């Protein structure tokens, strides 16, 4: 363990093996830092915060501060961060709220670029990337392997499905399907995240099924949306990824579904 003499570690903090804590870091009394973590310098970790092994935190990040909510009154809520994350300069993450589910969760191997923000009660899956200044409002749920572009903002209570991509400078105020691509100052669905699918080495058959289901759901105006969803399940639902999209659409949530512009944005 290497702790710079200028760092302040409060009594009660639990520090794992082979942890490096650099100059002027502050670690609160209810913090747990896993084995092999690195706090570069000027890092503040407060609240009931647990950080998984081998996570690296860059200067001026603030983790576990109270939620930015008028409903928070000092309850001992939590922030849990997974293993092998890369948390860059100025990133902020808040603990949960008692009227939420009491915990903010960030998964394994997430990469949060400079000045990204994860608000109270969010749940972020594994392998998610936040570009610079990407921001989540409270209670968001972000699926695994999602990419959120720079200067984008996701409205509170919004769900973004796994493998989706949010373009830069996008305001997301409705739920984005798994493997979808959302773009625009007020986000609309602009197709599938084909780049992400190919990088994951998804089979050509699955990509073909996803494109067929997308066109049936969003590029046709015949029948009701519920009927088109049923048809998509009949024709393409045997594909596992299509089934995930349809299950996501079928869940009842606070936000409407992100849809293409009325003039019709085609899947790429």
Image (cartoon, rainbow, N blue to C red):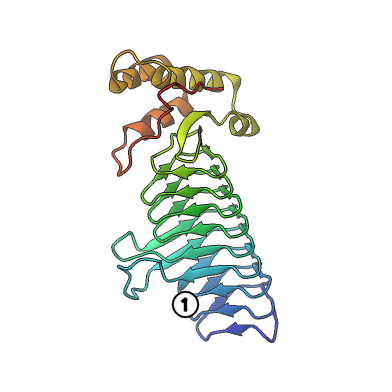
Residue drawn at x 38%, y 28% as measured from the top left? 246
Q: Quadrant of residue 249?
A: top left
Q: Position of residue 143 (x, y in %)?
A: 47, 43
Q: Quadrant of residue 115?
A: bottom right
Q: Is residue 28 visible?
A: yes
- Near-viewer residue (6 or 175): 175
Tell me the quadrant of the picture where the C terminus can be found: top right
Q: Position of residue 58 (x, y in %)?
A: 66, 66
Residue drawn at x 43%, y 66% as measured from the top left? 95
- Near-viewer residue (259 or 40): 259
Crowdedness of circle 1 by 10 Å Cα count: few (<14), some, many (20+)?
Answer: some
Q: Position of residue 125 (x, y in %)?
A: 49, 48
Q: Which residue is mark 1?
A: 30
* SS label for mark 1: loop
In this rendering, position of residue 15 left or right of residue 77: right
Q: Position of residue 5 (x, y in %)?
A: 69, 86
Instruction: Report how many numbered discs are placed on residues in the image.
Output: 1
Tell me the quadrant of the picture where the N terminus can be found: bottom right
242 in relation to 19, above or below:
above
Q: Is residue 238 visible?
A: no
Residue drawn at x 45%, y 33% as measured from the top left? 188
240 in relation to 78, above or below:
above
Residue drawn at x 38%, y 69% as measured from the top left? 77
């Amino acid at each position: 363990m290497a702790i710079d003499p200028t760092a302040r570690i409060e009594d009660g903090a639990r520090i794992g093996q082979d942890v490096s804590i650099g100059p002027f870091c502050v670690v609160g009394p209810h913090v747990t830092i896993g084995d092999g973590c690195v706090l570069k310098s000027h890092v503040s970790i407060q609240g009931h915060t647990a950080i998984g092994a081998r996570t690296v935190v860059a200067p001026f990040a603030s983790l576990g501060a109270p939620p930015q909510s008028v409903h928070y009154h000092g309850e001992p809520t939590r922030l849990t961060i997974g293993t092998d994350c890369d948390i860059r300069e100025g990133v902020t993450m808040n603990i949960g709220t008692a009227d939420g589910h009491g915990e903010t969760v960030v998964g394994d191997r997430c990469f949060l670029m400079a000045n990204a923000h994860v608000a109270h009660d969010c749940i972020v899956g594994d392998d998610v990337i936040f570009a610079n200044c990407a921001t989540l409002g409270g209670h968001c749920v972000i699926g695994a392997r999602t990419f959120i572009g720079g200067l984008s903002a996701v409205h509170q209570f919004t769900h973004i499905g796994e493998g989706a991509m949010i373009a830069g400078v996008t305001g997301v105020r409705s739920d984005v399907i798994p493997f979808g691509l959302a773009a625009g100052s007020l986000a609309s669905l602009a197709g599938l995240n084909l780049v992400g699918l190919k990088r994951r080495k998804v089979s050509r058959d699955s990509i073909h099924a996803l494109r067929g289901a997308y066109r049936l759901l969003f590029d046709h105006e015949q029948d009701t949306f519920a009927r088109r969803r049923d048809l998509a399940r009949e024709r393409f639902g045997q594909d596992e990824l299509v089934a995930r999209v349809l299950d996501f659409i079928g869940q009842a949530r606070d936000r409407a579904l992100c849809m293409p512009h009325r003039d019709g944005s085609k899947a790429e």
